[in-house]
């Protein structure tokens, strides 16, 4: 459950699980760096929660990648733009 | 038989005393402490009648002081949760999710039914089960309140943005539940009084029963956000990815899908010769290498296997 749960309406796919695995970080370690609870990392990885912009920027800083490389635009939005 | 040492000059029938469960107070109060029911001391009475009330006052009082009155200052200065129960053990499935909610209601019904006069049966079990029922209710309440690090009872400073959203949603849902109960009760009362011509005198309850029901109601209000949490999010925090169902495989699918999509886009661009250049071909080769690497990693590195390897 994710509060207002916008993720249920339009989940934003992300690469947090992959990037965390590459960085050899545990959920607890990543959570400490980002400043959230470890459970929230799990929710993010499963796409059950869409983070705020501030949190997305923190992930961007930690992984050293632009936000759009970590959080991917949903396909429906891409089709709509085309 | 009711007897008050040297004070009362009358005696009540035993049956009536047992039903009302009230001491006979007289003008001569010096001897009133010597009140004694048949086989029941003042100590027993105090425990049965006032322990739930004292527990309620303690819970509501401490909750108010910690979560409302001084929560911000206390949590900021101590940098700790002001009202947090951590369960160091792995929570059993029986005390999670909808089962926990049902068990709590079962305990509440058991306690309410064990109150004197609540159910008009004279089974021995009902006569003596008030305290055990109260104990079970308190136990279930502790299990519910401690659900997911007692998120529903936490101050803002102890929660991250997702958890704050969850907590606020829990209180909104709880409000809706309570409002629905009140509206339905009002409609039922209206129909009973106006249409069914219900006699209000039939609702008179013994004091102990009324106190017990009030205690259960207050406990319900306090624990309701936690029960809502358990209902809508049944997997406890210490649940593994496997317990979460297909979480890890869903994540794997998502990663593979995204890499394949990127690869297909690159191939498409190359095929159309829009960006046909050594740089684009290099990017394609890099993407293919990434995909192979990811597939290798995902194939043999589920969370379980990684843990075993360690």
Image (spheres, rainbow, N blue to C red):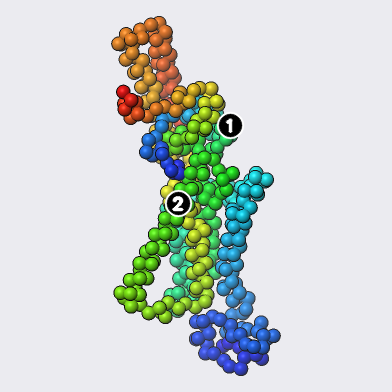
Pointer 1: what residue? A33
Image location (x, y in percent) of residue A34: 56, 32
Q: Give the quadrant of the N terminus of chain B.
A: bottom right
Q: Residue at x 55, y 43 (%)?
A: B159
Against B56, residue B310 (above or below) is above
Element assignment for label 1:
helix
Q: Eyeballing the image, is B271 above or below A81?
A: above
Q: Position of residue B160 (x, y in %)?
A: 54, 40
Left or right, B212 with respect to B28, comes to left
**The one of B286 and A77 positioned closer to us in this rendering:** A77
In what quadrant of the picture does the C terminus of chain B appear? top right
Q: Residue furthest right?
A: B30
Q: Is residue B234 above or below residue B293?
A: below
Residue that numbered label 2 is attached to: B172
Q: Are marks 2 and 1 in contact (CB under 8 Å)?
A: no
Q: Is residue B99 visible?
A: no
Closest to the observer, B71 or B159: B71
The chain letter for the residue carrying disc 1 is: A
Q: Residues within 10 Å of mark 2 (few under 14, many from 20)?
A: few
Which residue does the image show at 37% across and 64% down from the upper left?
Answer: B184
Residue farthest toward the top in the current orientation of the protein: B278
In space, the residues marked 2 and 1 are separated at their CA atoms by: 31 Å
Residue B79: percent from left, percent from top: 65, 44
- Tell me which corner region of the image, top left, top right, bottom left or bottom right, holds residue B113: bottom left
Q: Position of residue B55 (x, y in %)?
A: 59, 65
Q: Could you say whether the residue bearing mark 2 is in a helix, strand or loop?
A: helix
Nearer mark to the viewer, of 2 and 1: 2
Q: Residue at x 52, y 28 (%)?
A: A57
Which of A38 and A56 lies nearest the eye of the viewer?
A56
Could one spot residue A2 in this view of the protein?
yes
Judge from the rendering whether residue B255 lies leftward or rightward of residue B157; answer left or right: left
């Amino acid at each position: 459950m994710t509060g207002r749960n916008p993720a249920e309406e339009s989940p934003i796919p992300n690469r947090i699980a992959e990037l965390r695995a590459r960085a050899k970080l545990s959920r607890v370690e990543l959570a400490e760096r980002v400043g959230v609870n470890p459970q929230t990392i799990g929710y993010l990885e499963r796409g059950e929660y869409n983070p705020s912009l501030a949190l997305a920027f923190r992930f961007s800083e930690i992984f050293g990648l632009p936000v759009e490389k970590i959080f991917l635009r949903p396909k429906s939005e891409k089709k709509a733009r085309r | 038989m009711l007897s008050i040492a040297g004070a009362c000059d009358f005696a009540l029938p035993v049956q009536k005393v047992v039903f009302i469960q009230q001491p006979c107070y007289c003008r001569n109060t010096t001897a009133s402490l010597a009140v004694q029911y048949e086989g029941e001391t003042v100590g027993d009475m105090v425990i049965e009648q006032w322990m739930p009330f004292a527990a309620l006052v303690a819970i509501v009082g401490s909750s108010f002081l910690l979560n409302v009155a001084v929560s911000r200052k206390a949590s900021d200065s101590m940098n700790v949760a002001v009202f947090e129960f951590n369960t160091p053990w792995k929570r059993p499935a029986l005390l999670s999710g909808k089962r926990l909610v049902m068990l709590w209601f079962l305990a509440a019904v058991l306690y309410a039914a064990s109150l004197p006069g609540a159910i008009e049966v004279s089974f021995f079990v009902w006569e003596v089960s008030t305290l055990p029922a109260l104990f079970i209710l308190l136990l279930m309440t502790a299990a519910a309140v401690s659900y997911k690090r007692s998120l529903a009872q936490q101050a803002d400073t102890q929660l991250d943005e997702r958890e704050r959203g969850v907590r606020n949603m829990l209180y909104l849902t709880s409000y809706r539940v309570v409002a629905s109960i009140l509206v339905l009760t009002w409609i039922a009362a209206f129909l009973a009084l106006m249409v069914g011509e219900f006699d209000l005198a039939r609702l008179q309850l013994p004091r102990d029963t009324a106190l017990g029901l009030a205690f259960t109601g207050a406990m319900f209000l306090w624990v309701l956000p936690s029960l809502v949490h358990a209902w809508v999010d049944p997997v406890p925090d210490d649940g593994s990815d496997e317990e979460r169902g297909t979480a890890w495989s869903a994540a794997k699918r998502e990663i593979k899908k995204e890499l394949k999509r990127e690869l297909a886009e690159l191939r498409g661009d190359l095929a159309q010769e829009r960006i046909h250049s050594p740089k684009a071909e290099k990017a394609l080769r890099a993407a293919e290498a990434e995909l192979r690497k990811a597939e290798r990693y995902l194939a043999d590195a589920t969370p379980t296997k990684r843990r075993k390897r360690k």
